Image: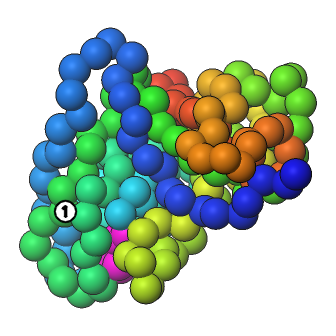
Amino acid sequence: MANTDFPMGFIPIYNQSGGELQSVVHSIADANDAIYVDDVVELHTDGYARACGSDQPTRVLGFASEYKAASSGGTISYVPVSPDLVLRAQVNSADVDAQGDLELSYAIDYTTGDTTTKRSKMEIAGATSHATDYAIFILRVAPSRNSVANALGEHVTVECKFNPTVTF
């Protein structure tokens, strides 16, 4: 059975070193684009936090814990990125279909979120696999969370981390 196409952003699951996941806040510009729950949040050169706007972010702050409408200003709450933070995300293609496709780095398929649910639709760009140069490092296939199986192939859901040599 094929995996379900369900873009979900980057959902923080746990820290490998232990400890609870806690949110922090950062200022966003008055002219911000919408930020959706579980979007990758990055620090821009103007000093404000914004939703990731490229496939290769360079200053990742973390993962949005709340929705912020466009042009809302104020602050955004997010779970900060760390080398030990494990995330759950979906691959946007059928390119991660063998064990050899795991433990490689991949780019982010950044996109606007779902305007109804206010949740992220960012995914891992499966066609971009490389040994070290991209922001996301896939660890393993994520365990299934319901009766529907999750397997290597199109729209596989994985556990991943941010590549610290690229994004911090």
Label 1 sits on a secondary structure element that is strand
Q: Position of residue 149 (x, y in %)?
A: 74, 43
How many circles with numbers are drawn on the protein?
1
Q: Residue furthest front?
A: 147
Question: Residue at left 18%, top 38%?
Answer: 22
How crowded pointer 1 is (Cα within 10 Å; few <14, some 14-19, many 20+) is rated as many
Mark 1 residue type: Ile
Q: Quarter-wise, where is residue 77 in the image? A: bottom left
Q: Position of residue 82 (x, y in %)?
A: 34, 28
Q: Name the magenta segment's main secondary structure.
A: loop
The residue indicated by pointer 1 is: 76
Say if the magenta span includes residue 153.
Answer: no
Question: Residue at left 62%, top 33%?
Answer: 143
Above or below, 74 against 63 in this view is below
Q: Nearer the viewer, residue 118 or 149?
A: 149
Query: Is 45 left, or right, of 96 in this rendering?
Result: left
Residue 47 visible at all: no
Question: Residue at left 56%, top 43%?
Answer: 145
> Where does the magenta region start and end?
32-36
Q: Quarter-wise, where is residue 115 in the image? A: bottom left
Query: Is 38 left, or right, of 89 in this rendering?
Result: left
Q: Nearer the viewer, residue 45 or 70?
A: 70
Q: Nearer the viewer, residue 132 or 92?
A: 92
Query: Is 60 left, or right, of 153 in this rendering?
Result: left
Above or below, 2 against 149 in this view is below
Please state, as top left, top right, bottom left or bottom right, where the C terminus lies in the image. Answer: top left
Query: Is 97 left, or right, of 112 in this rendering?
Result: right
Q: Position of residue 119 (x, y in %)?
A: 42, 69
Q: Residue furthest top?
A: 17
Q: Position of residue 128 (x, y in %)?
A: 78, 45
Residue 142 visible at all: yes
